[in-house]
Image (cartoon, helix red, strand yellow):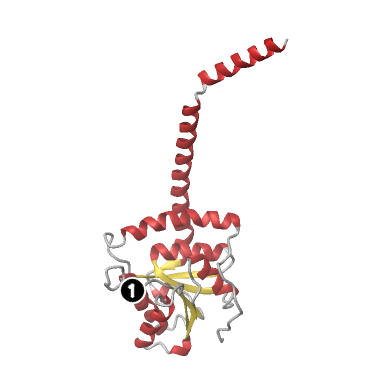
Amino acid sequence: MNYLINSTERRYRLVLSRLFPKGKRIRRSVIYLLLFGFFFSLWANYSVSSFSDPYISNNLNDLPQQKVGLLLGTSKLVKNGRKNAYFYNRIDATVRLYKAGKIKYVLISGDNGRKEYNEPEDMMEELVKQGIPADHIFLDYAGFRTLDSVLRSRDIFGQKGYIVISQEFHNQRAVFLARKYGITAYGYNAKDVSKNFGFRTRVREYFARTKVYIDLFFGTRPKYGGAAITIPD
């Protein structure tokens, strides 16, 4: 009796292995997974842009007045030691926004993970040079990611609405995140850089938008918290 059961089981396994070879099943699964990831990334990029576009602009007159402009940090220099156009274009946009009376204060949120690297203070130095008073500038040293900058502006600095200042592709993601977390955010687009210069940044942005949905799904929080900091009315 046991012999018949074992024999039948072996034949059954043999038929399955011929119909569905293990290697082919694995390859098929990998292909399906890659296709899913590709189409999900396309959808994520489209949805972030289409959701955010009504709230961002290149034109100051399209934006409402807000108490705070959230300036997203970036490095002052690129790896070869040259000036970073992203940095200086964001500085120029912030100065225009402030001098037009659209914002009263600037909150600079960036990376200060190493002693020799300090995005917020580098940006503050440039803003002061261009006429924005130092006491109208607040620094968030723990803006390691756009998600961190967006949520810390609310949770640490108490801002439930503001104007994000960065390039358009970055503003789209930042405003999307902010509004998904209940923050009334708008975006003022700084001048972009040439496509050749910004190619690697655009590739990273493509995948960052996919990660936005992963962070939303898992409820990802900023890396650091901290005591509340008041920006005066």
Identify the residue at the far front of this view: 3
Q: Callout 1, which amino acid?
A: Asn
Q: Quadrant of residue 194?
A: bottom left
Q: Quadrant of residue 35?
A: top left
- Pointer 1 local density, CA inside 10 Å: few below 14, some 14–19, many at least 20: some
Provide residue 21's location: percent of width, then percent of height: 49, 24
- What's the residue at 40%, 75% (across, down)? 117
- Helix, strand or loop status at disc 1: helix
Provide residue 78's location: percent of width, then percent of height: 31, 69
Q: Quadrant of residue 115?
A: bottom left
- What's the residue at 31%, 71% (across, down)? 84
The quadrant in which the C terminus is found is: bottom right
| Left or right of 215 on screen, residue 4 | right
- What's the residue at 56%, 62% (across, down)? 180
Q: How many marks?
A: 1
The quadrant in which the N terminus is found is: top right
Provide residue 153's location: percent of width, then percent of height: 54, 74
Provide residue 105's location: percent of width, then percent of height: 48, 83
Front residue of 113 and 159: 113
Give the answer, above or below, for where 222 lies relative to 116: above
| Left or right of 85 on screen, residue 102 | right
Q: Which residue is mark 1?
A: 89
Identify the residue at the far right of this view: 1
Does the image show residue 222?
yes
Does the image show residue 50?
no
| Left or right of 205 on screen, residue 12 | right
